[in-house]
Image (spheres, rainbow, N blue to C red):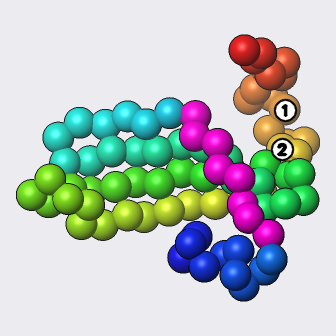
Amino acid sequence: RMADYGKETGTTPKVSYKRMLGGGDVFVVEGTIDYGDGVPVSYVGIGELRDGKISKMTEYFANPFEAPAWRADFVERMEPATA
């Protein structure tokens, strides 16, 4: 649990939410988490509601990585958007 992370590690993660979207009984949360080392870990959570309450939450975490060279023909490199 995120609430126990600080007690176990001595650091407090910083969560930055990018967006939340969905409809009906399903929603998706997207953001990043900094666990104290300055590396933003990507986060996606898929939530399911039952009777207006969260009944299930499936979460995915991924460290940043360079795309493999074999994918170069399938993408166009873009500069990050600035706010």
Type of the residue with mark 2: Ala
**Is residue 26 inside the magenta stretch?**
no
Q: Residue 74 versus residue 44: which sits nearer the camera?
A: 44
Type of the residue with mark 1: Ala
Magenta range: 11-18
Residue 75, compared with residue 83, is above or below; it is below
Does residue 13 appear to the left or right of 67 in the view shown? left
Q: Residue 73 versus residue 79: which sits nearer the camera?
A: 79
Q: Quadrant of residue 77?
A: top right
Badge nearest the viewer, 2 or 1 = 2
Residue 62, compared with residue 23, is above or below; it is below
Q: Which residue is mark 1?
A: 72
Q: Residue at x 79, y 69 (%)?
A: 11
Q: Quadrant of residue 13?
A: bottom right
Q: Which residue is mark 2?
A: 67
The residue sitting at the left extreme is 51
Quadrant location, the C terminus: top right
